[in-house]
Amino acid sequence: MNILEKIIYSIVSPSKFFAYAEKHDRIRDCVFYYFLLSWIPAIIIMLLYGIDQDNIIMKGSLSFENFISLGLSSLLLIFVSSTTFFLYTFIVYLVTQLVNKKYEYRQSVITVSYGLTPLLLGLVLALVSSYMKYYLIMFLFLIIGFVWSIALFIKGSKIIYKFTTKQSILTMLIAPIFGVIAFSGLILFISGLSSKNTNLINLSYIMMGSGIADYITIVFLVKSKKTNMFKSKS
């Protein structure tokens, strides 16, 4: 499948698409797909607000310096998006390993990268709507994309991992969220130490503590032998 076919089939026929991707797609295929879709919003930001001589980011006429600044901002957006993607998929992989050691990192990348399709497309449409000052439509695109991606996360994990719905929600949504919170707390802690900001350090303790505690709770539930809620379907 080419990129356009993957976008269409991941939304229109997710069951068949995830089954196909699990058999044929490699990690680099999924990463390239995600990076391509995540680059689109960054490029749109640079073009829309850079070509406009009275844009909302930098008031005044367009200059070479402004265009370079917008380009660097776009690269920063791509970097943050890429880092979050790899962190998210790694946390998903860790949780799935607790369920069954046979699961591969490739399967986590497939589920996350293709599951994010509606959200990334919704972000593109929201950026265009924001530029045209259609703010209500912008929020609608974001909400629809977010909800649709959650549905694809659940559908994809049920197809690829043979998970139950409860298992999919825990491994694809709840555990990664708390893992990202804990990681963000670590970043804040490092920033607080470098800047000697006690408020940042105290906030980082809260984020790391709550994130790790909740993540460990989910891990305990996954490994618990007292409930069959987390057992994969045969």
Image: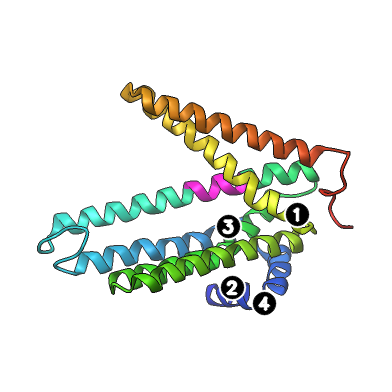
Q: CA distance from mark 3 to mark 4?
A: 22 Å
Q: Quick one: label 4, few (<14), some, or many (20+) residues within 10 Å? A: few
Q: CA distance from mark 4 to mark 1?
A: 22 Å
What residue did someone put label 4 on?
Answer: 13
Question: Residue 48 magenta-drawn?
Answer: no
Q: CA distance from mark 1 to mark 3?
A: 29 Å
Which circle, 4 or 1, is nearer the viewer? 1
Please tell me which of labels 2 and 3 falls first in the chain: 2
Disc 1 is placed on an element classified as helix
Q: CA distance from mark 2 to mark 3?
A: 15 Å
What residue did someone put label 3 on?
Answer: 28
What residue did someone put label 1 on?
Answer: 166
Q: Magenta residues, as a range? A: 83-90
In this view, 74 is above or below 131: above
Please identify the quarter of the rendering in which residue 162 is found. Answer: bottom right
Which circle, 1 or 3, is nearer the viewer? 1
Residue 73 showing in the rendered view: yes
Q: Which of 181 and 73 lies nearest the eye of the viewer? A: 181
Can you give x and y, in whole percent of width and height, for residue 103 in the image? 76, 49
At a point 32% along the width and 69% down the height, the residue shown is 130
Residue 74 left/right relative to 113: left
